[in-house]
Image (cartoon, rainbow, N blue to C red):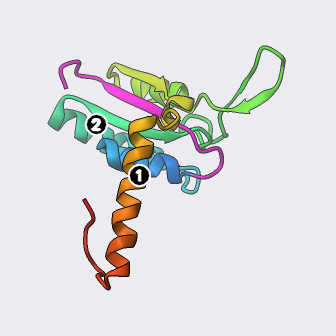
Amino acid sequence: ESHRRIIVVECMGREAGFLTLHAGLAGGADTILLPEFPVDNDELLHHIEKVHNENKCAVVAVSESITLPENGEVSRYTTASGTHRLGGSAEATASFLAKSLNIDARHIVLGHLQRGGSPNTFDQVLATTLGAHAVKSLCQGESEIFVT
């Protein structure tokens, strides 16, 4: 909110939007754009403008393979080796929103940052402990309980 701009966050997912959907819901995105649903430019612009006017900021989560608002094509980029890959949707969407609404819009690509790291010792011990308590509860005939 302090920066009074639109932030467009590109999430992993290739042709499926479930990662973007869950990341957008968990992160409180104002709009979530998925490859399974075509972008309605007028509806997108109206909604983002309304949200920005009310909150002085807006967060848009986009999947890497959405149909771009500006040209209706799937966003792709070329790697240094010449390979074409899906991606670039956040940059293209931020540019479209900035030009259309005359509001500062920035983008960020989460990419593999979204995956998280390998479990550490604490994570493994916690999972084992909770699993052991769950099995013990089942063996004692308990069900529909929350193991802590």
User: Mark 2 touching mark 1, by CB under 8 A?
Assistant: no
The numbered disc on residue 15 is none
Which quadrant: the C terminus?
bottom left
Q: Is residue 146 left or right of residue 135?
A: left
Front residue (pair 118, 16): 118
- Magenta span has 5? yes
Q: In the rendered view, would you say 86 is above or below 47?
A: above
What type of secondary structure mainly makes up the magenta span? loop
* Image-based side of 72 in relation to 25, left or right: right
- Which image quadrant: the N terminus? top left
Tell me the residue that label 1 is attached to.
127
Residue 88 lies, in percent from the top left, at 60, 28
**Residue at 45% across / 44% down in the picture?**
124
Front of the two marks 2 and 1: 1
Question: Farthest residue in the top direction?
Answer: 80
Give the quarter of the image for residue 63: top right
Magenta span contains residue 97: no
Q: Give the number of the disc on residue 49.
A: 2
Q: Position of residue 84 (x, y in %)?
A: 78, 29
Q: Residues within 10 Å of mark 1 (few under 14, many from 20)?
A: few
Residue 71 makes an appearance in the image: yes
Residue at image point 36% right, 27% down: 7
Residue 126 vertical position relative to residue 70 in the rendered view, above or below: below
Judge by depth and name the residue closer to the eye, 137 or 119: 137
Local crowd size for mark 2, using a 10 Å CA cut-off: few (<14), some (14–19), many (≥20): many
Q: Which residues are magenta?
A: 1-16
